[in-house]
Image (tube, rainbow, N blue to C red):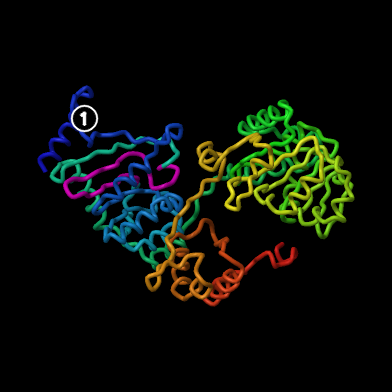
Amino acid sequence: MGSFIQNLEASLHKGFIDQKHSKSGSYRPKLLVNNTKQNENVLTSLLEELEVSESFLFSVAFITESGLATLKSHFLDLKRKGINGRILTSTFLSFNQPKVFRELLKIKNVDVRLTSLEGFHSKGYIFCHKTHYSLIVGSSNLTAHALKVNYEWNVKLTSHENGELVHHFKNQFEDVWKDAVPLSEDWIEQYEKTYKPVINRKMIDQVIDFPTKYSTNSIENAIKIVPNKMQQAALQQIQAVRDAGEQKGLIISATGTGKTYLSAFDVRRFAPKRMLFIVHREQILKKAKADFKNILGGIEKEFGILSGSTKQNGAKYLFATIQTLSQDESLHQFDPEAFDYILIDEVHKAGAQSYHKVIEYFKPKFFMGMTATPERTDDFNIFELFDYNIAYEIRLQEALEEDMLCPFHYFGVTDLEYDGQLIDDTAILSKLVTEERVNHILEKIHYYGFSGEKVKGLMFCSRKDEALKLSNELNERGLRTIALTGDNSQEERE
């Protein structure tokens, strides 16, 4: 105890009396801000305190689903350790949506109450430790933007358990808590009847208006669409590869960072007489064709599809599935030099014989490969296939830091241990679809929830028979699922 007080005294002396004080201590008052350039945010400090706390009190006016999502797995960890907390919030300005209260109700080790106090607008977090309290007080509500993005000021303070300041905060909390209403299903149902969402008309207008800007496909309109900063840098590097006399280039680009648009911009710059775009699924063809049409402009007949159901071989810009193109009767219809620019999407699949056959047949002026995952476990070397010419690379972490992707929450869920064995995707089918494992999956789906008004779910399975059996098991429990595999026809996949 003595060493803690000495540490705290040194920390407070430096924080409040003399910043040049020789002893700094580890409990200095600290300003918490969100600084994306330095990878700092309020959430990190909040989670650090939460992880080592013995209990916690949150007094926050506004809570969003995304804000709560940042804490859900941590609350679950605390529940396993027998640690509980309380959250005091309200319906001030009708900001908090009914759905967020339903999400709060799922967290069994957190008591939630609603205050009707006029103008309730507090933002404070108190963490109880063995010897002391930590407080984070300032401008951040329990929203993802307030904890990670917005310009916020929050002060983090440490207090001895007998300190006056922390008891002011605690007493304030307890005074409001005792008159507040416990969160319940009945309360939420009543709230839903009177809730009127706050709508930002300007934002809705922007979203509705956006597609009309690029609805026509004339070359004049296409040229108005310009690459973003990342794409401009990439285009320069791709051109540098060509200027060096190379005929192949590889783009490594995280999913969602716009590599199809990037390739279309490069095709626009290259201006080929004919171009071939190769993919592994017909669904991707239609989207790629539409994206290219937006960027290149031109008339409809210049853009064609070569697939099992469509044969528009004469198009200037041809979008083909590898399955159809690699067949001898399709491949040999084309002169090896018919296309001066060829792109292969999802080129990490190019280890297959069908891709080798096509790559060896054609002689374009430039070959471009695109992938999010170049590292393989099957000993196939994609880098070698493209002569080790990495034209551009942007990985997921970098894309997130550059604010290029829609923000998302990732939850790592431990698989089920049953009869002393971990049931993972290497287990036999009967164990993969036991009642206990299906319950485990459903329990985690329920706890972590979903965004929006209704569930849109995608579940990857280890193999086809698991997909079919698991879909049946889930449907028997009231879900609406369908198993979809490579065995399904194109029409069924659509």
Graded by Cα atoms within 10 Å as few (under 14), some (14 to 19) or many (20 or more), the crowding at tag 1 reads: some
Q: Nearer the viewer, residue 35 or 271?
A: 271
Residue 259 figure quarter: top right
Residue 221 lies left or right of residue 428; in this view the side is right
- Please, is residue 286 above or below residue 388 in the view? below
Q: Residue at x 34, y 36 (%)?
A: 32
Residue 230 figure quarter: top right
Q: In the displayed image of the protein, which residue is found farthest to the bottom? A: 476
Query: What span is in magenta?
Result: 121-147
> Disc 1 designates what residue?
24
Measured from the top left, where is residue 433 in percent x and y?
51, 73
Q: Nearer the viewer, residue 276 or 112?
A: 276
Q: Residue at x 57, y 62 (%)?
A: 460
Q: In the displayed image of the protein, which residue is found farthest to the top? A: 20
Amino acid type assigned to the residue bearing label 1 in the image = Ser
Q: Image quadrant for the C terminus?
A: bottom right
